[in-house]
Image (spheres, helix red, strand yellow):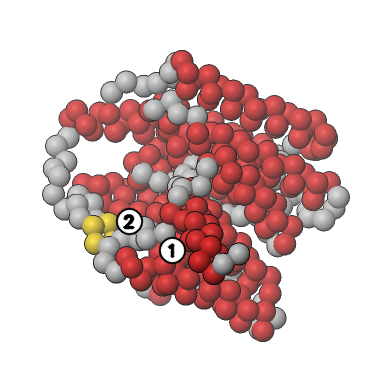
Amino acid sequence: MSEGELKGILKRGYGVIFYENWPIWLSGIIIGILSVLCFAWGRPWGVAGGLKNWGDWIFYGLGIYSKSPEPFFQSTNSLLTLGLLWGAFGASLMSKEFAIRFAPKWELLKGCVGGIIMGVGSAMAGGCNVGGFFSATSALSLSGLLMMIGLFVGAYLGLRYLYWELEHISTGQGGAASTSGGQAVQPYLGALVLLGSIVFAYLYAQEALTRQGVLLLFGVAFGITIQRARFCFVRGFRDIFMTAEAEIPKGITFAILISILGFAILKWAGLRGEEVYVPQAFWFGALVGGIIFGFGMVIAGGCGSGSVWRAGEGQVKLMLAVLFFALSTSLTENWINNSERLLKLMGTSVFLPNYLGYFWTVVVLCLFFLLYLIVAVWNEKTEKFLVEP
C-alpha cells in the first residue's frame, strides 16, 4: 500500500467518523454499552446531579448556601456532566460544527424558562431524562417507568403550548446570528481538547483518583457519541406527536435494553448494590416530576443531556438552559431535602426484583420497551398520534 493510498483511507475514515452523522441505532447501542461499563466501573450515568453540584457552588459562592458542596473536580456527578460537555465540545470542533449560535430574544428567554422548569422536574423525579428515566429504569426501578409516562404527557403539553405560541404570540425574528470563524483549525483544536481529557484523567490517576478520572472519560465518550449522532432524548417523546418519526425511539430502545440487561447482571451477581440508583420518587415525584420535566425540555429545545451537548457546540439558548437548570435543580432539591413533608410526598423507592424477581423484571421491562418501539414504528406509518397545529 502506497503512502498516498494510506492517507486516502485515513481521510475517508476521518470523514465517516466526524463529517457524517452516526446512525441513531448505532449510537443507541454505544450508549447502552457505555452505560453498563460506567456502572460497572463506578456509578450509573447521570446529568442532573452534576448540574446540581454546579448550582450548589454558584449559590455557595454568592453566600446563599453556608455549607460547602462536594468539590467540583472530585464529585463523580460533576465529572460525568463535565465530561459530556467536554466530549461534545471536542467532537463539534473535530467535525467543524462548533459555532457560537445566538437566537432571537424570545428563544433565549424560553431557554431560561425551560431550564428552570427542567430543574424543578428533575429534583422531584430523582434525575433528568438520564438519571430519572434512563438510568433509573436500567437500575430496575419502577419510578423510571413512571417518569417515562410523565415525559410523554409533558412533551405533549409542551408541543401544544408551542403550537399555541405560534398562533398567538409574535416573537419576532431579530437577534439570531452565528459566528464560526477558524473552521480550518477546528479539527486540530478538537484533537487537543480530546487529548486534554486523557491527560486530565492521567493526572487524576497520579493523585489516586483513578475512579474519578475514568468517569470523566466515560462522560467524554457519551458526549462524543451523542454529539456525532445528534441524539436527543426529547425527540423520543416529542416526535411521536410532532413528526411521527421513530428514529430516536429505536435508538432509545436499543440503548435501554442493553443497559437493563447489563445492570440486572451486575446487581444479580452482587457486584453492585441492589438499591443503587433506585430513586425515592414513586409515585408522585416520578410522575409529576416527569410531566414538569417533559414540558420544560420541549420549551427549552433540549433535554438534560441534549441541552449539555448542544451547549458544547456553541448554542447560546441551550447554554442558558443549562445554567438555569443548574440553579433551579439546586434550589428545588435543597428545598425538598429540608422538608420531611415534601420528601414523603415525592414517594419511596420501588426495586422491581423485590416483587417480580430478576428474571421476570427483565422480561417485563424488555417487553415494555419492545412495545414502545412497535408503537413508535406503527405510528410512523399511520401518524395516529400526530398532533396538528
Q: Picture coordinates of residue 302 (x, y %)?
A: 40, 46
Quarter of the image where the N terminus is located: bottom right
* Residue 188 visible somewhere in the drawing: yes
| Neighbour tally class for label 2: few under 14, some 14-19, many 20 plus, Cα within 10 Å | many
Residue type at tag 1: Met
Residue that carries the numbered disc 1 in the rendered image = 94
Which residue: 47% across, 75% down?
A: 192
Nearer-the-camera pick, 181 or 308: 181
* Residue 34 sits above or below residue 344 on the image: below
Local SS, label 1: helix
* Label 1 Cα crowd, 10 Å radius (few <14 / some 14-19 / many 20+): many
On the image, numbered disc 2 is attached to which residue? 315
- Identify the disc placed on residue 222: none
Left/right of residue 210 with respect to residue 314 in the rendered view: right
At a point 43% along the width and 54% down the height, the residue shown is: 19
In the rendered image, residue 93, in percent from the top left (x then y), is placed at: 40, 64
Q: Residue 189 at what x, y percent from top left?
A: 41, 72
Extreme residue in the right direction = 269
User: At x 16% / y 41%, what residue is drawn?
Assistant: 171
Q: Real-space Cα distance between discs 2 and 1?
A: 17 Å
Q: Nearer the viewer, residue 61 or 21?
A: 21
Which tag, 2 or 1, sits closer to the chain's start? 1
Picture coordinates of residue 198 (x, y %)? 58, 74
Q: Is residue 380 above or below residue 28?
A: above
Residue 341: tell me if it is visible: no
Label 2 is placed on what type of residue? Gln
Image point (42%, 59%), residue name: 95
